Amino acid sequence: MLKLIFNGNTVRIDGDSSPILTDSGGKLMIKLIATDMDGTLLDSNGELNEEIYSIVGQLKDMGIKFAAASGRQLMSLKRKFEPVDEDIIYIAENGAYALDRDGEIYINAIDKNTVAEIIEISKEVKGSAIFICGKKYSYTDNEELFETMKKPIFGYEIKYVSDLQSVDEDILKIGLFDTIDPREGSMKIMLPKFEAKVHMTLSGYNSLDFLNNEVNKGTALKCVMDKFGIEKDETIVFGDNYNDIEMFDAAGTSFAMLNADEYVRSRAKYIIGKNDDNAVIETIKSIIKEIDR
């Protein structure tokens, strides 16, 4: 059985409830590990512990694929994983875009008329800032958001435009940043008007994200699994937010962060430590030790 023991405010996972990583014959059962980024693999400053680069290499040598699954745009993720870029499967824009070194695995853009409606109605949310995301670039008409998203913590390829309606390309995701918890602000305005047209999910930094109805990290993860012939029981995922729940459901083993919302924690099979304690990295290291044992 796997034993994951952490200090401080973290959780010990052992005993009969522990994940089993090999079958009775000792055959490796884990073929894919996918992790969320903000609030999960990244610390609270948005920094990535560089130890993950060697871990990705170890997993590759063991025949285990590694996926970064995030609400972030592709280029932001690629900057984080530049040293091991060719060994990463990217699930970007909350599942609207998935690809690896060989090309696109999944892409799902929002209807252009719906994009235009969301941009217009978002103006009713006081103090909010909106950005729209294409394959390579994101766009915003808010100067403060433009400067923020360029900072290293996000590392976005973003362009400032005076009129978002003038952007003429496929839009994969729309992010609406609120000044308060979106459940108390933007969602009350946007949900009644768009729940039949798009999927709305809470992401990091008080962002309400809009995607096509069938789009989420779980859908994209299943496409990745299908491409490589990976079963549910051969997949491990990590997450901390509502946009990770479908990914929890798609995997055989799911870990929620201790810093996650109580409901999000309840949807995962197991709870580990906090993102600021490098709990994901420590858990993967324990998994590697267990498999090598």
Image (tube, helix red, strand yellow):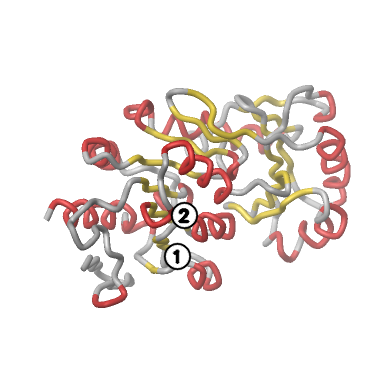
The residue beneath circle 1 is: 259
162 in relation to 27, above or below:
above
Q: Quadrant of the C terminus?
A: bottom left
Callout 1 crowding tier (Cα within 10 Å): few <14, some 14–19, many ≥20:
many
* Coordinates of residue 191 in the picture (x, y in percent): 81, 58
46 in relation to 97, above or below:
below
Outermost residue, bottom side: 16
30 in relation to 240, above or below:
above
**Looking at this view, is 181 or 229 the one in front?**
229
Residue shown at the point (24%, 66%) measured from the top left: 4
- 84 left or right of 79? left
Q: Secondary structure at mark 2?
A: helix
Outermost residue, left side: 293
The residue beneath circle 2 is: 39
Q: Quadrant of residue 87?
A: top left
Badge 2 amino acid:
Gly
* Coordinates of residue 182 in the picture (x, y in percent): 70, 59
- 63 left or right of 179? left
Badge 1 amino acid:
Asn
Residue shown at the point (71%, 53%) measured from the top left: 200
* Coordinates of residue 77 in the picture (x, y in percent): 47, 35
231 in relation to 134, above or below:
below
- Does the residue at mark 1 contact the one at mark 2 (Cβ under 8 Å)? yes
Residue shown at the point (44%, 41%) measured from the top left: 68
* Coordinates of residue 248 in the picture (x, y in percent): 49, 59
Q: CA distance from mark 1 to mark 2?
A: 8 Å
Q: Secondary structure at mark 1?
A: loop
> Sequence order check: which comes first, mark 1 or mark 2?
2
